[in-house]
Amino acid sequence: MSDYLPPLRDMDFLFNEVFDIPAWWAQTPALVEQVDADTARAVLEQAGRLIAGVVAPLNRSGDEQGCRWDNGRVITPDGFADAYRAFAEDGWVGVAGAPEYGGMGMPKVIGAQLEEMLNAANLSFGLYPMLTAGACLSLLNHASEPLKSRYLPPMYEGRWTGSMCLTEPHCGTDLGLLRTRAEPSADGRYRVSGTKIFITGGEQDLTENIIHLVLARLPDAPAGAKGISLFLVPKVLVDDDGLLGEANAVSCGSIEHKMGIKASATCVMNFDGAIGYLVGEPNKGLNAMFTMMNYERLGVGIQGLALGERSYQNAIAYARDRQQGRAPTGAEAPGQAADPIVVHPDVRRMLLTMKALNEGGRAFSTYVALQLDLAKYSESADARRLAEAKVALLTPVAKAFLTDMGLETTVHGQQVFGGHGYIREWGQEQLIRDCRITQIYEGANGIQALDLVGRKLLGDGGQAYRLLSTEIRTFAEALTAEFGTPLLAAVNELDDLTAWVLDRGQGNPQEIGAASVEYLHAFGYTLYAYLWARMADVALNTEQPEPFHQSKLATARFYFARLLPRTLSLSASVKAGSHSLYLLDADLL
Ligand SMILES: Cc1cc2nc3c(=O)[nH]c(=O)nc-3n(C[C@H](O)[C@H](O)[C@H](O)COP(=O)(O)OP(=O)(O)OC[C@H]3O[C@@H](n4cnc5c(N)ncnc54)[C@H](O)[C@@H]3O)c2cc1C
């Protein structure tokens, strides 16, 4: 595998040339003292050096060794504990954390780029700090002040990690079925009992404490999803001065043996009357957990993107080097026995598809992260509301589309290597194995699509969608014909499809589930067209064009010519409706 190179030039392009983010920071009182273009670059360069130099080299060995379970202890692969310590000591766990509790206070756009680099370098490793940052966000928004001041500082410092405990053996997507119980005790705390499965980082040997956020039911709770509360359950109890005391009644029963992310511990966790603290209000636990999950969902989308980027970096290096056959138009390297495979049209198709999906995906994740920052820091209430509406609409698309495109991209990256992509030596097959989980956890992609269509479109009658489509249309109308005309056609087509889905969904609920995945994909390709048009517009109008801008423009042209037309077939599938899905009884399937 070639060395990982953090894509700092592309990140810089998005920040400074496409979205002009530093100009917005400079006008935003909450951020003006906190960050500017130079700080952003310095943060990304410094983090990128550590990630490329220390974390990336453990990706392969971590996959080969995996985690080990030994009588309740989990041992991470060699080198993980030292690398984690170095990562935490630099402050990167709390990079986007609240400064009043010791976080670095960087905006989400910076956190998102850092996540991409970390996950591209080593997804298994990246999951430990990512879960911690997500748990911190939930505590920051919903926990009482004493809980926040006791738990957040060591978590931001990376001395303690966090975990998210939702799933139980009989309950994954349908959390209303969960059975873990929490009994109140006289001292105001709770005793939590039950078994959780598939808990990422539920146990590990990286830190001295683990803070579990656990969904459980109070004794008098209503049935279903409305009776779920959230509890903070530390692995080791913490006294009033923040010092570690006795072990809590939490144990790791085993770890899973799985297809990928082998260096990430996926744990069965037993809570046997463990001491816990209520976070937020009773029976409102799903709301509190969703704060974490929405954040995580963009993060999981970024995992897909990151693996696609890593696969591309390997594939392009290989395609320039590997010699097989001759270019269709005659030898391009006549002095060699054969031309490098990068001359072949089909290899170019794969490489450009990867490049277009990765760079489009990076623009998309940056755009969503920017909306999160606008929703949080903007002075104007209208701007905050608009950004919140866009975040809600785009979160399921970010999770599902970025990971589906991540898998496609990693598979192309394997194919470019031919048989050498199938064997372990080059690392391409690991990227596919690691990527596959991103489509499943944090709400399977089919569930994201249902969320988009059922809640986000039908829920508000398409209002948030119309805000976004107006933004795209206004931008397309101001563009010259080359990108303006196809972008306008694409957004018109998506408007039409959205109206169709809204109309059909009202009358027959089966239509929603039948349309949702393909609709989400049509949505994703149209969004990428918008973002590619924005990038192409900058590249066309830049005063000092570099080869980088030439590459952007050519990739934008490829995207519009070869990938955007996928929406036509998706649209036809959506409009075929649910009828053909129910022609067979389940026992004949
Ligand atoms: C490696 C790994 C790490 C994980 N980490 C964590 C973690 O840290 N914390 C945690 O709590 N959980 C974690 N999970 C659990 C993960 O989030 C769940 O596996 C996932 O949400 C799906 O739940 P399930 O496996 O029970 O599948 P099910 O809910 O049984 O779903 C099976 C299939 O049916 C589909 N389906 C289900 N219901 C519907 C519906 N209503 N409409 C349409 N389709 C439907 C799903 O999309 C899926 O394709 C992890 C899982 C793995 C494998």
Image (spheres, rainbow, N blue to C red):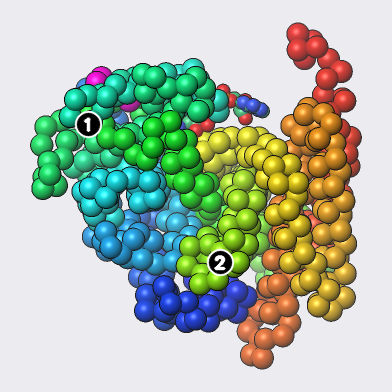
Whether residue 98 can be seen here:
yes
Residue at (85% x, 40% y) in the render: 503
Q: Secondary structure at mark 2?
A: helix
Q: Secondary structure at mark 1?
A: loop
Give the residue type at disc 2.
Ala
Q: Residue 381: which numbered mark, if any? A: 2
Judge: label 2 CB < 8 Å from ligand 1: no
Say which of 179 and 223 sits in front. 223
Give the residue type at disc 1.
Gly
Say which of 348 and 44 sits in front. 44
Q: Quadrant of the C terminus?
A: top right
Is disc 1 in contact with disc 2, using a CB cutoff of under 8 Å? no
Residue at (74% x, 38% y) in the render: 516
Q: Looking at the picture, does residue 30 appear above or below residue 415?
A: below
| Magenta-tinted stretch | 269-273
Whether residue 398 can be seen here:
no
Does the magenta segment cover residue 402? Answer: no
